[in-house]
Image: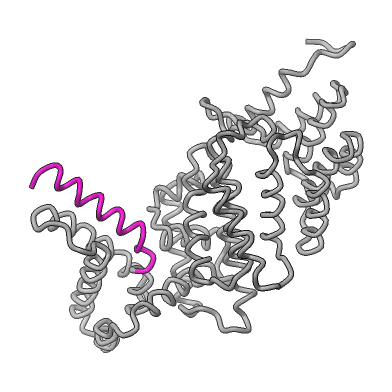
Amino acid sequence: MTASTAEAAAAAAASAVAAERAGMVASLIRLTGDWALAEDCVQDAVEKALRHWPEAGLPRSPAAWLTTAARNRALDVLRRRRTERAKLTERALLDDAARTDKNRDDRLSLIFTCCHPALPLDGRVALTLKTVAGLNTAQIADAFLVSESTMSQRLLRTKRKISHAAIPYRVPPADLLAERTDGVLAVLYLVFNAGYGQPEGRLADEALRLVRLLADLMPSSDEARGLLALIMFQQARRATRFDAAGDLVPMEEQDRARWDPVLTAEAHHELRRATRSGRPPGPYWLQARIAACHASAPSARATPWHAIVPLYDALLTAQPSPVAALNRAVAVGFRDGFAAGLDALDALDADALAGYHLLPAARADFLRRLGRTREARAAYEDALRLVAEDGPEARFLHRRLAALPISQGECT
């Protein structure tokens, strides 16, 4: 075995796991009913491959080899357990009929089970990242700023809840599918938003991959396509959202020449696909249309705010939200003038946005543009009290605050 053959084996295993891990784990969970066993068997198969492939050569289909090895490992474990349930499961493991359709159903069942509404939201997010996306416990803990032991306990409680509450491992029946799909999309969008504000973007990448998977598995879901388009538009700007120091760059100052044209074109394609059913547009499609307006503008000055405000009106009708109302108020300010934007901000439900730093930050920005420096300074200070002291949002607000001119009567 040489270093090059070991590297080739590791690369082939990593590629196969990235593409097929969710399907392998889902299939084993369906057949064994044991979440931990399924994950362990897939990991055992990878370790076996890394020992075997450098000597024997890469198999024609690394994913198929890993799937077979994981299934065989599950059989060995089940044989040792010597229970009737294990024997029944063993017979199911040997039945490979209609494997392609089963694999599709298994992956859907896995996603819907991880995102079941009976589970706590933080558990849904963590279990989806662990079981479907394949992140390890330490990576998930780092993303959500908790200790590895805390995240390990969260995952354990969530899996126990699935067992104790007898949550079914299946795609919901037709009468519940639309409602449950909305819940799955909400979890995946939460994962994306958690990663979107991080310079390294690991969680955002995983969310994009998971939504691609869901859209492929549910091709008739307009909202899955809409969410996919929305995330693609936002990810197309990722390279310009942070500077070399990891500090936030607002959209109007981003270098649009560096926005990803391939991902943007793919987002436009998915947005068109999401309307082919003829059903009324949903919240994710509407948000994607807003993102498309920004992506299509050649410059910040050319942003079609006249088209964006009505889209926010439609979004607030489809899914009322204080954050969407805040974004609409900002859009009004850029369409009708900053004084009109301040009026729109003042009309918002302040209690619903209490603790949300973007409300005072938006006020500060409009006040700054209007030259009302003293009021802008106070609003920036209000916003700073609501963000983490050492985060990119705080650094951005401090830069804006420091750039304000000293108005007459103020002390430095």
Residue nearer the viewer, 303 or 353: 303
Q: Tell whether 139 sits left or right of 4.
A: right
Q: Reply above or below: 11 against 238.
A: below
Q: Quadrant of the C terminus?
A: top right
Nearest the camera: 166 or 24?
Answer: 24
Main SS, magenta region, reads: helix
Residue at position x 83%, y 32% in the image? 366
Give x and y (percent) for residue 373.
84, 21
Residue 346 in percent (x, y) is at 89, 42
Q: Which residues are magenta?
A: 1-23
Where in the figure is residue 206, as x and y percent of width and height? 47, 53
User: Residue at coordinates 48% horizontally, 79% vertically from top-left?
Assistant: 170
What is the count of numbered marks?
0
Q: Foreground: 364 or 332?
A: 332
**Would you say residue 14 sits in the magenta stretch?**
yes
Residue drawn at 77 percent across, 18 percent down: 404
Q: Is residue 353 above or below residue 375?
A: below
Is 329 placed left or right of 176 in the picture?
right
Look at the picture and state if 147 lies above or below 125. above
Q: How is the image coloured?
A: one colour
> Residue at image x 70%, y 34%?
299
Residue 125 on image: x %, y %: 52, 59
Image position of 330 with respect to 18: above or below: above
